[in-house]
Image (cartoon, rainbow, N blue to C red):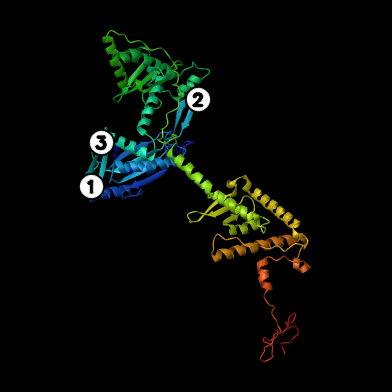
Amino acid sequence: MISPAGNATALDLYLSSSPAHDLHAPEGFKRRVEFESTLGDCSTETFIADMRRTRETFGKQSLKVETYHVIVSQTHEEADPLDIQAGFRQHEMVRAFIAEAFPGHQAKLTTQRDNGRYEDNADGAVWVPGKWHSHCQIASVSEREATLLRIGVDGAETRLHYAAGRAIDGHMKDIYHLRRTNNRVIRRELGYDNAAYVEACRRHSAAARDGRPVSHLGENVTRKDYAGRADPDGPGYSAHDAVRAKLREARALANDWDDYTDRLQASGVQTRVTGTSGVSYAWIAADGAEMKSRARGKTGLGSDYTKASVEKQCEINAAERAKGIEPAAPELIMAPPSPPTTDRPVPIYLTSDGRPPWDLEFEAYAEKVRQAGETYEERARQGLRKTIADPWVTDRDRLIAASLDYGITVEGRTGEPTVSIAALDGRGQFTMDTERLGAAWTGRALDEQIRIERNRTTDDRNRGPERETGGAAEQRPTEPGRISSAAIEDRRAQNVRRAADQRAEEYLGKRGRPGGDPAANGQQQPDRDAGRSSRDADKQPRDTDRRNQDTGKPSTPPRRPRPLGNPDRGRDYGR
């Protein structure tokens, strides 16, 4: 639908800044705006000012209409209200639709889903989530020249050229032009025939109405009606059901409005016309309570009982009597049965198997990624496998230190750790809990994998030739190729590894004796950096008594022994 905005500023505030309609509903989304964007030289925050600047540029301030309002919505079958991607697809589709239907015009698009509501049925009130829908506020004056493509009923294309500063005219506002443009964009962007889907929805609605008696089609069944029908101590129908039976009979037999009101007055129902077509009814219920209800509204009796609807039925009754056919009173049904529930039609996508094109694209992409093994989760698993297989890794601390060598960063010495891996686009890192990788990668499972791997490595070493020679000292194996070649990252990995090694040795030393330093008790400390020890072994020890070859004197004077205690003790400085 399209309509001129009476107040552009008020409409903009209502669409973007007002509270969500489902704010107080427990099941609601509680967000007013899900997606928002603009077309043309404007922004979402300054759309009104930008639109008015365009009007001033072309001298169109005197135009009465500043903006037009277009609403595009989709059913639950077209776009799942719980799927945020479905809302994004609709927003992108609406952008393409407005750009083609109103070329050259500034527009602000706001996509929402906060129009959820409670619906009454035989089981009580049921919450129905809101539908994805987009509000489009379109500037009346164009900011640039453009060409409009119109497609006729016969499919013939007509191109109309518009100069900059031209206001929206009848060709753009034509509802048939908008519908055909919308159908063309939906077929291209979403991949289904919208015209065929709309026709299927119309047939479904007609079939649903056919499931109810014809005389009950325009009646409104409310929550109170269902409660009254389900009351075990009640008559099986509500007070509104009882008065509807009287209204139904009077409407089916009356010749005109006066005849209709006279019949109702005879049965104890008073009528009062409100406005041009509204009607208010008053009556005494079976329990003696005074009852009032309107024909319209969510809690009204039904659209069949407005003045316009009653007068239309009276004309039909009078025409039948003129032909000698006496209208028959409808069957007295106090609680009409609910229409049969049938599945609503769904869009038929123009693909080989009738599935949405984005599902097929996602499956193809997922299969490609699965074959390449390049998902973030799989890359993290591979990095953890390589880190655990490193013989140097014997506990969680060493796992954290060694993970940098294998392209991942593990954090969390206790509990559930996290693993980070470089993003594929090179911007930052992607961090996830190891629980996301599966049950085999939780904190407890990682510790168990490290223990099993070390036991297996120890058993293999004991069975090998090293057992006869007493075994070799723990050595860091040849380092694998690093993910990053930056020297700072190499140094960082070495420092973190050395600190973890030192903490482990101090912990083991304290467990082996009551207290003190292991070296002070004659215990041999393990080499914390085998590579560094091998390099230091090649250096010659410093000769403190080395003499100058030319003079024969010591190259450095010998150090004087430092006396113990206070050297000034016993001296009398007062003399």
Q: Residue at x 46, y 17 (%)?
A: 237
Q: Residue furthest bottom?
A: 551
Q: In the rendered view, does 59 fall on the left or right side of 288?
A: left
Crowd class of label 1 (few under 14; some 14 to 19; many from 20; radius 10 Å) = many
The amino acid marked with disc number 2 is Asp
In-front residue for pair 384/544 = 384
In-front residue for pair 307/312 = 312
Query: Label for residue 165?
Result: 1
Q: Residue at x 31, y 47 (%)?
A: 48
The amino acid marked with disc number 1 is Gly
Query: Which residue was labeled with disc 3?
Result: 156
Query: Which residue was labeled with disc 2?
Result: 123
Q: Secondary structure at mark 1?
A: loop
Tell which circle, 2 or 3, labels the residue nearer the N-terminal end.
2
Position of 521 relative to 312 (above/below): below
Q: Residue at x 30, y 26 (%)?
A: 275
Q: Position of residue 276 (x, y in %)?
A: 28, 25
How far, Cα to Cα, is label 1 from label 3?
28 Å
Crowd class of label 2 (few under 14; some 14 to 19; many from 20; radius 10 Å) = few
Quarter holding the C terminus? bottom right
Q: In the rendered view, does 65 fall on the left or right side of 420?
A: left
